């Protein structure tokens, strides 16, 4: 479905849904008012309010970058493996598999007690010394968190496609070190704008100008954190694959038939409408022509493997999920643990107050979100969760 709404601002805002709340519209107008934003702003079908900039937004800029528009979980994204297994192999084993995965992959604030071997060998450690001075004391923690899930809406799932084939889905980012780097550079952007006497419509939209030391430092740290997030997902997939191989394949290593990985909180240098720009995707996936992506629904619903169509008006992008339709606080106020159990019937997962804010009812209907972006992606596989691990 093409653009459903356009805001008439300094540069237009193109919105791929008619379900955008007033706060999201206000934030979109704020972003579009910034003088360095290029051509237009693209708001995806899952758009919802964030801090400063909406989640589900694609912004192209020239000569500047907005650290808060990337967000505090730099490189957060999705990974998926299609396995040579059929649904029957999971019969009666989901509870044990969930315990095995939870034992292999720390969740929430937890870390590995000792770094896993694959984490030690990551080439990115050679550049850690070049990062912001105030994260230098976090190297050991970052090493032990490589291969860990985190909390909130991060998850590991086993899913089945329409052919009853087994998939692994994983959602995570750059953990504490990425969060700290983001916070430091967001503060740097605010200080820089204050020194110049600037007055952005929201302090969270403070920017860093290209050609400055602060800009160069942020881009260096941003790219490192994005690589760390990618490696974090890779290490976790390896840990999950070892458990599945042990429990479902007599210890013989399973060989995935397909593997997909995509960031959805990041910035990258790209070329659009004849100009070299920095594209910031905050809760959006790159969906260039033929590029594979993952759009997850909430636990208990379904997720989608998609192929991009390369829509120029969306800056070659699509949504990153269903998108929240209410805050975590509101979800906890409105729903009960009984509601959660009903909504996740048939899924092996936590069903307690600690994950109540992740109940499917707190999110937009994933089928509507997918339908609203039919001009951006085509669905290659529809996946139904049967097991979900959350922090």
Image: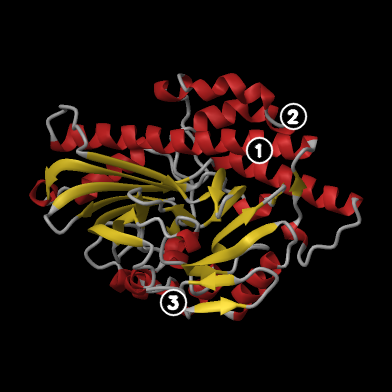
The answer to whether residue 285 shows anywhere in this view is: yes
Nearer to us: label 1 or label 2: 1
Residue 125, label in figure:
none
What colour scheme has been applied to the protein in the rendered image? Answer: secondary structure
Residue 172, x across and y down, in percent: 45, 46
Estimate the spatial distance between the alpha carbons at disc 1 and disc 3, rounded to whole Å.
41 Å
Q: Please provide percent x and percent y for residue 203.
A: 78, 60
- Which residue is nearer to you in this view: 139 or 263? 263
Question: Residue 105 appears at what percent x and percent y?
Answer: 38, 38
Which of the 4 image quarters holds residue 161? bottom left
Q: Which residue is mark 2?
A: 133
Image position of 190 (left or right of 305): right
Inspect this view and state whether residue 266 appears: no
Dot 3 corresponds to which residue?
A: 335
Q: Is residue 77 above or below residue 301?
A: above
Comes first in the chain, label 3 or label 2? 2
């Amino acid at each position: 479905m093409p653009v459903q709404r356009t805001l008439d601002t300094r540069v237009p805002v193109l919105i791929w849904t008619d379900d955008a709340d007033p706060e999201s519209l206000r934030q979109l107008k704020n972003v579009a008012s910034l003088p360095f934003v290029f051509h237009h702003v693209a708001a995806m079908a899952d758009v919802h309010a964030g801090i400063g900039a909406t989640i589900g937004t694609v912004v192209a800029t020239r000569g500047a970058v907005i650290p808060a528009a990337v967000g505090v979980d730099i490189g957060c994204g999705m990974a998926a493996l299609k396995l040579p297994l059929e649904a029957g192999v999971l019969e009666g084993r989901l509870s044990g598999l969930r315990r095995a995965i939870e034992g292999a992959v720390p969740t929430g604030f937890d870390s590995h007690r000792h770094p896993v071997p694959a984490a030690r060998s990551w080439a990115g450690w050679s550049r850690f010394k070049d990062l912001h001075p105030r994260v230098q004391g976090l190297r050991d923690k970052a090493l032990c968190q490589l291969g860990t899930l985190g909390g909130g809406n991060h998850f590991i799932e086993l899913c089945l496609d329409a052919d009853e084939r087994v998939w692994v889905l994983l959602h995570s980012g750059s953990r504490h070190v990425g969060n700290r780097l983001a916070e430091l550079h967001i503060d740097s952007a605010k200080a820089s704008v204050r020194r110049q006497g600037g007055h952005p419509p929201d302090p969270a939209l403070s920017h860093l100008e290209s050609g400055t030391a602060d800009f160069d430092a942020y881009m260096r740290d941003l790219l490192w954190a994005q690589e760390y997030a990618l490696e974090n997902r890779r290490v976790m997939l390896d840990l999950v694959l070892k458990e599945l191989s042990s429990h479902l394949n007599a210890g013989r290593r399973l060989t995935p038939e397909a593997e997909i990985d995509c960031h959805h909180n990041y910035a990258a240098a790209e070329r659009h409408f004849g100009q070299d720009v920095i594209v910031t995707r905050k809760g959006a996936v790159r969906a260039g022509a033929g590029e594979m992506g993952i759009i997850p629904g909430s636990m208990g619903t379904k997720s989608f493997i998609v192929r991009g169509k390369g829509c120029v008006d969306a800056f070659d992008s699509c949504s990153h999920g269903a998108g929240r339709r209410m805050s975590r606080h509101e979800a906890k106020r409105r729903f009960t643990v009984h509601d959660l159990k009903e909504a996740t019937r048939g899924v092996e997962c936590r069903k307690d107050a600690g994950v109540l804010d992740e109940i499917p009812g707190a999110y937009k209907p994933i089928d509507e979100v997918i339908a609203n972006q039919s001009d951006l992606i085509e669905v290659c596989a529809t996946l139904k969760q049967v097991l979900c691990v959350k922090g």
